[in-house]
Amino acid sequence: DELFHPEQFAPVFAQASPKVPVTVVPDAGHITLTLQHQAVQTVARLVAQAGASTVAPSR
């Protein structure tokens, strides 16, 4: 996200919980992360790899 410092997310999340994976999607910003095909595909792939049990059901 261009509003933050993405390179600093991994260490912060690792300190809070080593089980939280952090992936920086290159060339994807705050809005384009949901609109850019490659970014959406990357997020979908990572969620699938994490497994359905890690995704909370919608209510």
Image: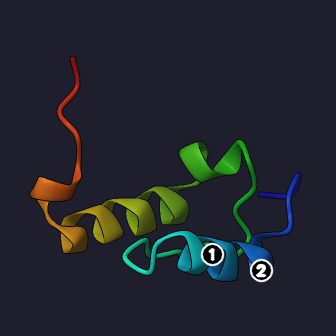
Give neighbour class at mark 1: few <14, some 14-19, many 20+ (Cα, 10 Å). few
**The C terminus: image quadrant:** top left
Q: In the depicted view, which residue is nearer to us: 55 or 20?
A: 20
Q: Quadrant of residue 52?
A: bottom left
Give the residue type that dot 1 points to: Val
Residue 40 placed where, x, y %?
46, 56
Residue 25 is left or right of residue 59, and the answer is: right
Please say which color scheme the image uses: rainbow
Which labelled disc corresponds to residue 34? none
Q: Residue at x 75, y 55 (%)?
A: 29
Give the residue type that dot 2 points to: Glu
Which residue has dot 2 on it?
7
Q: Secondary structure at mark 1?
A: loop
Which residue has dot 1 on it?
24
Task: Mark 2 or mark 1: name the one nearer the start of the chain.
Answer: 2
Residue 53 placed where, x, y %?
11, 55
Residue 7 placed where, x, y %?
77, 80
**The N terminus: image quadrant:** bottom right
